[in-house]
């Protein structure tokens, strides 16, 4: 009796097709809200599953040895183009790739990358582009952890920085870039990145992206290596601002916020042209800051309703702010729907399509009055973060920006009477009633 040869198990069909082009219907380009329901995924390739399964695997089987070699040639840079298939979950995976396809649609970007948190996205980006003796130019204020990353961590590796206020004019931006160029030349480095945050956290001050791009081209345009402009678009993205259309090169997100939108995950993202994404992808492959499959799947779920959630929250915020603006215990509002400054209004009109739902509330008094208001909220939750379905309130000076030196907080307008509010999707009249009763206790 002879042994029957064991037949090799057929290699399963890949679980997703190569990145598709944006679908058309009757000559019409489909809108992002429509594409979120299926873009980048073919149910036929996953047993007919309407939604993409969660691919919980650490590694992927190659079709053959030659295919494995070719994938690693792409990953290691021996061949341009990157991996042409699934390799290992530190590099890529079906859920992450589908999510990246869909995230890029909102920003009208060529490519996107997802990360384990917003800060891992920011850290990987900065490390990919900044080296010893380089200079970073950034707007201010930034999220406190971003400022700490630049000022305290990167400085340990000989990377320095200069900043300008969010509302700076073209002349002011030119002057800072000239100073940064001279500083980099003296240090033997270069101006490696211009990093923006607009609206700024927590003041809601806007940066003139177009003016920054023009200044970059005028002052640094003759550099051998171009200086990318990256911008944290968390407060308004992806619905109310598209920075790539105004001169930015890379868009940064804490996907924890509006994109995730349910206060149940932590993730980050970058969007932009492939030429800017490729160096970041290579570093992400090495240090492993990629988003996990389960979180990617949850973000795919959330992208299906991001337009609905953000639209409702924005409408609620407009109603709540209309009430707060008239309240005798409110000193002012940092709300983009009620801008008083002419320059800020001009930037808003050129760059933004909506006022958002996160704003600064300035209460008459100081820390004690702010704490009293926060402690007496009943519907709004006292918690950091923003962009969730529920309304959140926090005190930046004593919480998210506590580590920022007092002098810098004062210069940036992060005062003891500033309360940051993120409006959710509750009934707006109920929210107004909650704010009214909390203010009555102040």
Image (tube, grey):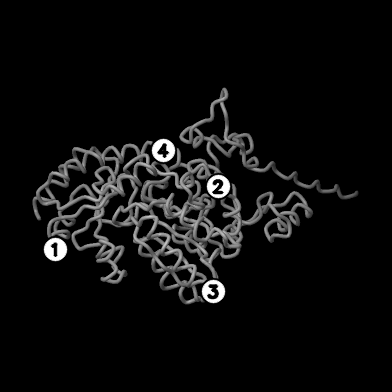
Residue 55 image position (x, y, % from top left) = 57, 48
* Separation of marks 3 and 4 at Cα, in angstroms: 43 Å
Tell which circle, 3 or 4, labels the residue nearer the N-terminal end. Answer: 3
Query: Front-most of 365 and 114?
Result: 365
How far separated are the C-alphas under marks 3 and 1? 44 Å
Tag shown at residue 368: 1
Q: Residues within 10 Å of mark 3 (few under 14, many from 20)?
A: some
Residue visible at 75% across and 44% down?
A: 10
Compute the Cα span from label 1 to label 2. Answer: 47 Å
Q: Is residue 151 left or right of residue 226?
A: left
Work out which quarter of the rendered image holds the C terminus and state it.
bottom left
Per the image, the residue denoted by label 2 is 95
User: Which is more N-terminal, label 2 or label 1?
Assistant: 2
- Disc 3 or 1, which lies upstream in sequence? 3
> According to the image, label 3 marks what residue?
132
Q: Which marked residue is nearer to the observer: mark 3 or mark 1?
A: 3
Looking at this rendering, what residue extends furthest in the top direction?
Answer: 26
Q: Residue 388: where, in percent of width, then height?
A: 34, 47
| Residue 414: image location, x then y, percent | 26, 62
The residue tagged with tag 4: helix, strand or loop?
A: loop
Q: Disc 3 vs disc 1: Cβ atoms closer than 8 Å?
A: no
Relative image position of residue 288 (x, y in whole percent): 56, 62
Question: 275 or 261, which lies in front?
Answer: 275
Identify the secondary structure beneath mark 3: loop
Left or right: where 149 falls relative to 30? left
Residue ID for mark 4: 305
Separation of disc 1 and disc 4 at Cα? 38 Å
């Amino acid at each position: 009796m002879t042994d029957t040869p064991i037949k090799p198990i057929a290699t399963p069909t890949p679980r997703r097709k190569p990145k598709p082009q944006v679908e058309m219907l009757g000559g019409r380009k489909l809108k992002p809200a429509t594409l979120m329901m299926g873009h980048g995924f073919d149910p036929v390739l996953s047993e007919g599953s309407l939604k993409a399964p969660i691919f919980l695997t650490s590694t992927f089987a190659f079709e053959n040895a030659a295919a494995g070699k070719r994938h690693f040639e792409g990953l290691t840079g021996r061949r341009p183009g990157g991996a042409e298939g699934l390799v290992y979950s530190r590099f890529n995976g079906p859920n992450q790739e589908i999510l990246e396809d869909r995230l890029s649609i909102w920003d009208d970007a060529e490519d996107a990358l997802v990360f384990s948190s917003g800060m891992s996205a920011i850290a990987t980006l900065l490390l990919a582009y900044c080296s010893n003796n380089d200079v970073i130019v950034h707007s201010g204020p930034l999220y406190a952890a971003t400022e700490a990353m630049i000022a305290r961590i990167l400085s340990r590796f000989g990377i320095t920085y200069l900043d300008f206020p969010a509302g700076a004019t073209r002349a002011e931006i030119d002057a800072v870039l000239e100073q940064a160029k001279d500083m980099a030349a003296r240090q033997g480095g270069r101006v490696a990145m211009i990093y923006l945050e607009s609206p700024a956290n927590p003041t809601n001050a806007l940066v003139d992206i177009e003016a920054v791009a023009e200044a970059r081209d005028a002052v640094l345009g003759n550099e051998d290596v171009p200086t990318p402009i990256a911008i944290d678009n968390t407060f308004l993205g992806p619905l109310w601002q598209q920075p790539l259309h105004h001169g930015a090169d890379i868009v940064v997100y804490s996907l924890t916020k509006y994109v995730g939108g349910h206060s149940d995950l932590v993730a980050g993202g970058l969007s932009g042209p492939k030429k800017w994404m490729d160096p970041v992808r290579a570093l992400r492959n090495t240090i492993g800051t990629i988003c996990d499959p389960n979180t990617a799947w949850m973000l795919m779920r959330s992208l299906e309703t991001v337009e609905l959630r953000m639209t409702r929250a924005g409408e609620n915020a407009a109603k709540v702010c209309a009430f707060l603006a008239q309240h005798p215990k409110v000193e002012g509002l940092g709300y983009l729907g009620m801008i008083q400054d002419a320059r800020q209004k001009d930037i808003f009109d050129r760059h933004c399509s909506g006022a958002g739902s996160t704003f600064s509330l300035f209460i008459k008094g100081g820390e004690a009055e702010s704490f009293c208001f926060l402690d007496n909220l009943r519907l709004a939750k006292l918690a950091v973060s923003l962009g969730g379905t529920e309304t959140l309130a926090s005190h930046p000076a004593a919480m998210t920006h506590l580590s920022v030196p007092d002098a810098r907080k004062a210069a940036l307008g992060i005062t003891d009477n500033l309360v940051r509010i993120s409006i959710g999707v509750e009934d707006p009249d109920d929210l107004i009633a909650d704010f009214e009763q909390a203010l009555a206790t102040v």
